[in-house]
Amino acid sequence: AQTVTQSQPEMSVQEAETVTLSCTYDTSESNYYLFWYKQPPSRQMILVIRQEAYKQQNATENRFSVNFQKAAKSFSLKISDSQLGDTAMYFCAFNNAGNMLTFGGGTRLMVKP
Amino acid sequence: GAGVSQSPSNKVTEKGKDVELRCDPISGHTALYWYRQRLGQGLEFLIYFQGNSAPDKSGLPSDRFSAERTGESVSTLTIQRTQQEDSAVYLCASSLDIGGYYGYTFGSGTRLTVV
């Protein structure tokens, strides 16, 4: 069974600074997909960024980028120039064609003015 | 529709009553998923549909939980004889591709409170 671990229950960062959220996963598969989702107080899960395991290049979406270390089974999310609107729960998720996403326990991020 | 719609947004029910939660996926999305999120926790997989079939029901917590999907569209999650431990947010998601490789689109969830 696949597991996803987020070791930081809560984090805070000053507005305009950079923060990195950690995620590790466990799988015996060689090809899979990794995701970061954001869940603001509105409860709706929003896809932030996606990484395909067979691609070595780290994915980037504007201020959001990942550091994907396949051998270490690590998939961290870096948020640059943090904004107040980034305050939310962030979930790391894994999919290996098992037709369901497996989620980590989440990291609560607070961006302080 | 433009997004995944869930109803009701909030539901308060008495212990022992049955509840139905509804999910309207994005039109044309083949796969539909139900997750449960307890307060302050991550998402727990319940069930998914491929078309109108549910290949994997292993996540349903007990036989009080059931789900169906019709017309490859609307899905209903039913909880019978609700218990206080059923209190949670129930999230529905859909995806265009069966594997969900491009991620899921989620609804805003139904917050269920059993009193």
Image (spheres, helix red, strand yellow):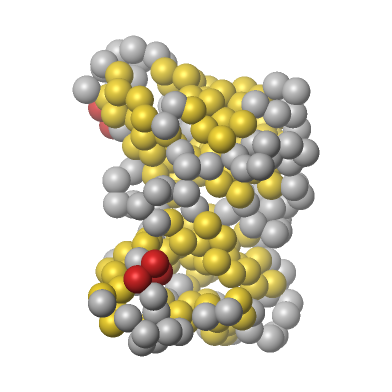
Total marks in image? 0
Is residue A62 toward the left or the right of residue B16 in the image?
A: right
Q: Is residue A29 visible?
A: no
Is residue A32 toward the left or the right of residue A18 in the image?
A: right
Q: Is residue B112 visible?
A: yes
Q: Position of residue B110 (x, y in %)?
A: 42, 34
**Residue at x-position 75% and y-position 47%:** B96
Q: Position of residue A51 (x, y in %)?
A: 64, 73
Q: Position of residue A104 (x, y in %)?
A: 44, 61
Is residue B66 toward the left or the right of residue B19 in the image?
A: right
Residue positioned most to the top:
B17
A108 above or below B29? below
The quadrant of the rendering that contains the N terminus of chain A is: bottom right
**Residue at x-position 53% and y-position 78%:** A64
The part of the image, by quadrant, that contains residue B75 is: top right
A16 above or below B101? below
Residue positioned most to the left:
B115
Q: Position of residue A60 (x, y in %)?
A: 61, 80
B103 above or below B34? below
The quadrant of the rendering that contains the C terminus of chain A is: bottom left
**Residue at x-position 66% and y-position 42%:** B2
**Residue at x-position 68% and y-position 74%:** A53
